[in-house]
Amino acid sequence: MKRSDRLDLVARVFDGRQRDDAVELGRREKALGDARRRLDDLESYRAGYADRMASARDTDPRQMHELSVLVGRLDAAIRQQAALVEGARISRDEARERWLASRQRHHAITQACARQVTAERIEDDRREQKESDELSARRFPLN
């Protein structure tokens, strides 16, 4: 088996790893987007209830208390969701770094494979030329 064939097998392995890392990066990116949308929704709900509290000054104290409790719960949920968004962002960044590294390794092995194929082709051309020269020398000796 030629060295270029062995390198080609290695390149295929790295290609598979790069593809797997790209898929994982896509998953992490989607998870981050979903977490951000949930955070945006919670912040929107909180703003709506805070506006209701501000405009409901003449409202029954019990209803004001319930709105206040609800806004407090939304604040806690927002803090929790913000932490999840940050975790998802970190996870996405780590997946991106893994993908970039695997892409770089794949690119390097692909280039090495191409250089090896070129070197083997040059060596084959030299060998064929040498054989052709030797055959000509045997057919037409200089003596």
Image: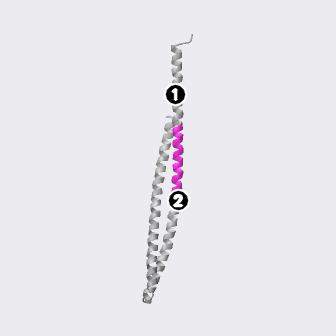
> Where does residue 27 sit, x and y in percent of width and height?
45, 59
Confirm whether the magenta stretch covers residue 63: no
Q: Nearer the viewer, residue 50 or 99?
A: 50
Which residue is depicted at the point 51% across and 46% down?
Answer: 106
Q: Which residue is mark 2?
A: 93
N-terminal of the pair, mark 1 or mark 2, is 2
Which residue is depicted at the point 53% across and 59% down?
Answer: 93
Confirm whether the magenta stretch covers residue 97: yes
> Where does residue 53 sit, x and y in percent of width and height?
45, 83
CA distance separating discs 1 and 2? 48 Å
Q: Main secondary structure of the magenta part?
A: helix
Q: Which residue is mark 1?
A: 125
Question: Which residues are drawn in magenta?
Answer: 93-115
> Where does residue 15 sit, x and y in percent of width and height?
48, 47
- Label 1 SS: helix
Label 1 crowd (10 A; few <14 / some 14-19 / many >=20): few
**Quarter in which the C terminus is drawn:** top right
In the displayed structure, 107 sits above or below 71; it is: above
Label 2 crowd (10 A; few <14 / some 14-19 / many >=20): some
